Each structure stands twice: as C-alpha cells, then as structure tokens.
Amino acid sequence: MLWTHEDATAAFAQALAAQPDITHAFITLHGDLGAGKTTLVRHLLRALGVQGRIKSPTYAVVEPYELPALNPPPCCKGQAHEAARLCTR
C-alpha cells in the first residue's frame, strides 16, 4: 500500500483499528528505511488505545503492547495478508 502523506496513513490506521477482527490479525511490515512503517504502527497503536512510547518496528522481532480497551489482550493469530483482508470488507 502507498500513502502520499501522513494523514492518509493515519486514516488507514484508524480504519484498520476499527475492524472487529483486528485483535486476531498478524501484521507484517516490509519496506525501506523511511517508508513509513513506524508512522503506521504508531497511528495504529494509538487508535487502539496504547499510550506511552512506541518503538520503531524496524529492529524488533516482536514488540508486545498492552491494549487497554480490549479484554482479553489480543493474541497473534492469522495470516500475513490478514490486514489487507480486514480493510477490504
């Protein structure tokens, strides 16, 4: 996916966070340095209610975050294409 500005990235993250199956999604990010991976992750996690520091996903294998609005916390299930499927409903 390609967004031309940060507002479009934020809007996509908001839409993704609003999907009912997001707690079961497994999302992988691929892209060059500066492609916007961290921006997307920060907007997505903020939309899900995460507060505090959000690290760049570039150097992390797994970075767990506590999602306050969800009970129980989300688990990592699904396929890498799950995020795209969720956003095309």
Image (tube, helix red, strand yellow):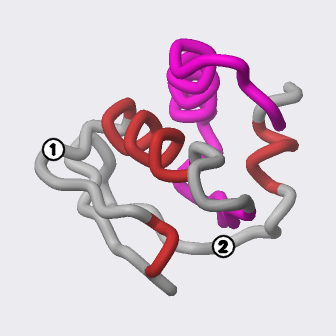
Query: What residue is pinned by disc 2?
Result: 77
* Residue that appears at 46% across and 80% down: 59
**Residue 42 appears in which quarter of the rendering?**
top left
Specify the farthest residue to the front. 33
**Residue 20 appears in which quarter of the rendering?**
top right
Closer to the camera, 33 or 57? 33
Q: Residues within 10 Å of mark 2 (few under 14, many from 20)?
A: few
In percent of width and height, residue 37 lies at: 57, 51
Marks 1/2: CA distance?
Answer: 23 Å
Which of discs 1 and 2 lies nearer the camera? The answer is: 1
Q: Quadrant of the C terminus?
A: top right
In percent of width and height, residue 60 lies at: 44, 81
Q: Is residue 22 magenta?
A: yes
Q: Quadrant of the N terminus?
A: top right
Query: What residue is pinned by disc 1?
Result: 51
**Residue 64 appears in which quarter of the rendering?**
bottom left
* Residue that appears at 66% across and 66% down: 26
Secondary structure under the numbered disc 2 in the rendered image: loop
For badge 1, the amino acid type reads: Gln
Specify the farthest residue to the left. 52
